[in-house]
Image: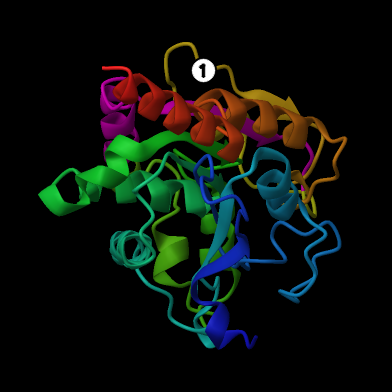
Amino acid sequence: MTEENMLGLSSVFQCENSHPRGDIVFVHGLAGHPWSTWHPQGKRDNQDLDFWPFWLGEELQANVWTFGYDAPRFGYFGQGMPRFDLASNLLEYLAVNDIGDRPLIFVTHNMGGLVVKDVIRTAQNFDDKKAIIEQTQGIVFLSTPHQGSHLANLIDNINVLTKATVNVQELKPHAPQLRQLNEWYRQNVDNLGIKTQVFYETKPMRGVLVVDEDSANPGIKDVKPVAIPADHNSIAKLGKNDLVYLSVKKFVKKCFPTLVTTEQLELTYSKHHLYQDTM
């Protein structure tokens, strides 16, 4: 599959059981990639399934997807799209893939968490999109800059010729749009019944802590952000024994309904007909 074909939603794992527990959608961040962001070796080959999105689907019997989009840091790599447009793009991809018919979990890194918050906020305004909100059970934020990132200022000041993209401009610390989005999420997340899990990096990259602990904290009641001894990139590249993987797996289990096997459904069906026959 070419890089161009990895834009939009790509399937990582499809449950062979005709009754999957739900859908898990991974959303990368600034200058990220739908495969390499999550792969321990940073591999971009979508035939290499030895990474944690696949493991989650296999272990939890859920369908897993990864969303790819262009969000370059510098203008000479591309233009990118404003976050509002990315949210509407993802929302439509969810709709055309019938995601919203089952319980849904988002796992996000960096700017991906902001895109997903905008997806939920946008869906509120359209009756035919509200199923996405109703089915969204939880969101995992890995180093999401809810209050922006100082790296955005650094990139913007490197060289006027680099022309930081709109995606970088929207990540500047304490930008009004970010504060507005985070305030909206804090005020609505409980009423929407969406659980939140937060992790943040503690190691700098090239001397810069890309998303500090304050920005990574969305400020939601009873949500305790978890410090991870990793840098901004490695926090999303997990092994099976890593704390983030084990914790996310437990979080998803809690969010999804109890697994109903085919055998249990058949047994329920048989009991129903047996009851009808005795009436």
Say what amino acid the circle numbered 1 marks: Val
Image quadrant where residue 169 sits: bottom left
Residue 92 locus on image (x, y percent):
30, 65
Q: Is residue 46 visible?
A: yes
Residue 17 locus on image (x, y percent):
59, 50
- Residue 201 lies in the magenta stretch: yes
Residue 120 locus on image (x, y percent):
30, 44
Image quadrant where residue 245 sits: top right
Q: Quadrant of the C terminus?
A: top left
Q: Is residue 252 left or right of residue 131?
A: right
- Residue 249 lies in the magenta stretch: no
Q: Is residue 77 visible?
A: no
Which of 97/228 is in front? 97
Magenta-tinted stretch: 179-204
Name which residue lies at 63% across and 88% down. 2
Question: How many C-alpha atoms fall within 10 Å of the one at disc 1: few (<14), some, or many (≥20)?
Answer: few
Q: Quadrant of the N terminus?
A: bottom right
Residue 81 locus on image (x, y percent):
37, 72
Query: Does residue 143 lie above or below 83 as drawn?
Result: above
Query: Does residue 222 lie above or below 78 as drawn?
Result: above
Name which residue lies at 67% across and 24% down. 226
Q: Is residue 150 left or right of residue 231?
A: left
Name which residue lies at 66% across and 34% down. 200
Query: Does residue 154 lie above or below 186 as drawn?
Result: below
Which residue is situated farthest in the front direction here?
278
Which of 215/153 is in front? 215
The residue pinned by badge 1 equals 223
What colouring style does the render use? rainbow
Which of 226/124 is in front? 124
Q: Is residue 143 left or right of residue 238?
A: left
